[in-house]
Amino acid sequence: MDDKNAFGPLALEGGKPVRTLPLPWELPGSHYIGQEELDMLRQVVESRSPFRYYGPDLRHMVDHLEDAFRSRYGRAHALGVNSGTAALHIALAAIGVGPGDEVLVPGYMWVSCLSAVVRLGAIPRLVDIDDTFCMCPDDLKKKIGPRSKAIMCVHMSGAPGHIDQISEIARGAGIALLEDCAQANGSSLKGKRVGTFGDIAIMSFQLNKNMTAGEGGMIVCDDEGLYNRAFAVHDLGYARDASGRLDVKNEACQLWGIGSRMSEITGAFALAQEKKLDRITGAMRSAKWKIRRALEGTPGLAFRRILDPEGDSGPFLITMHPSAEYCQRFSTVLKAEGIKGQPGGLAFLPMEEWGLHWHFNNQSLVRKTSLQAGGFPWSHPANAFAAEYSYGRGTLPRCDDLCARSSLLTVASCLSEQDIDDIITAFKKVAAHLAA
């Protein structure tokens, strides 16, 4: 146990802070943007062909990106789209989710997970989390019912939970499993990549994600019928022929689309980043586990359970504290020691401040808000089964407890050894003082 006298007074009590420089931005792929992205983008610009399906000199950037993801994930099909949010909607639409269905979603996720369900006319059914900060298999089994159409397993904060167990539960129940890998692209469990356990999986390339193109997303699956439906929904409801033109004669693909195609510009950027994904996640994983192992045994700190450290993609370090009050105090004191980010960045915060990642902060869900005056989908007759479902605080006890007493450090993909040492020193200093 560290003695508080070894560190000197806290900064909040007139002492010298551990550091004065802000930590780097937490945006993983952004630190690796360079000449490769410029070279890829230049090809698209010079070809004057930014649309993926035809143009004067098409470079096939999205095709190559899809090839890369088929190879990376070992899946038969890959489909580039314009965002992770769109990818969730498309995947659920491909499964056939609609009124009369419920989709099981963990209470710690992102607002896009909920909106994808609601906009299709289905009902989100909340499932509690465990100390992996991912879906709890035991609560999932309790929640599955006759209306359950799909499970959306969200690999939160860079690492998977019990996805192997959840996959078995889904198969046993005969319902579809969608993996949301938006925050865990490049992660794995026991050597098996996330995105390969379920029927269909999505990734995101938004700026906060492990690899980025600013925006963009990817869908992967093995089932050809599922892929064909996803393709039609992501485009304008139809297949395309060899020349890239819409094919309205294919009866298997006569649906309704949302025009969420990936552009060649996004594809070029993401293709350059995909080649760097292992370096990006490797850097974050190495830095995170140096910090975590140095802090193990520190009073007042416990850590999120990571089932497979080697499969952790590394962008977040989650610590748990004895109480909500202790967590808030720890966070305030640690920030005063200089563990904070660039203006506008999020280097460290109590998870109570993690916004729309928590079910009860999604007021559109809590209030069952609709896009229409009639209250759809909550008012749809086929959804009467969910009349008593509630979504506010108290719905998921474990989720609410972990939110209240946990804090989150974003692990930049470019942390220096000095940055790592400062983080460790600051955590130990604050813990020693609060323990005393």
Image (spheres, rainbow, N blue to C red):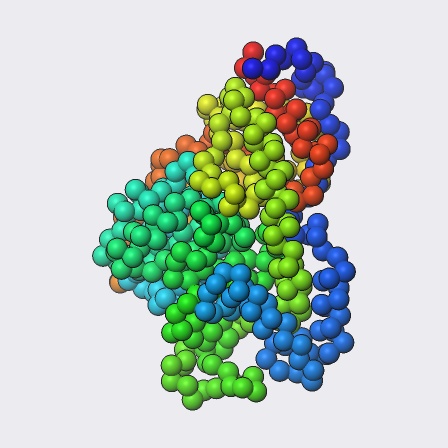
> Which residue is at a point 63% across and 19% down the rendered structure image?
429
Provide residue 335's location: percent of width, then percent of height: 65, 28
Number of on-image labels: 0
| Residue lying at the far front of the rendered structure | 191
Q: Quadrant of the N terminus?
A: top right
Q: Quadrant of the C terminus?
A: top right
- Decide which of 436, 291 is in the foreground and name it: 291
Where 363 sits versus 204, above or below?
Answer: above
Asked which quadrant contains residue 435, the reply is: top right
> Which residue is at a point 26% across and 45% down the rendered structure image?
142
- Let me know if residue 235 appears in the view: yes
Where 223 sits versus 163, above or below?
Answer: below
| Residue lying at the far left of the rendered structure | 146
Where 380 sits versus 398, above or below?
Answer: below
149 with respect to 50 (left or right): left
- Let me know if residue 376 appears in the view: no
> Which residue is at a point 37% across and 49% down the rendered structure image?
164
Provide residue 286's location: percent of width, then percent of height: 61, 40
Provide residue 219's location: percent of width, then percent of height: 49, 64
Where 340 sits versus 159, above or below?
Answer: above
30 with respect to 393 (left or right): right
- Decide which of 377, 395 is in the foreground and name it: 395
Provide residue 289's location: percent of width, then percent of height: 58, 35
Asked which quadrant contains residue 131, the reply is: top left
- Decide which of 13, 45 is in the foreground and name it: 45
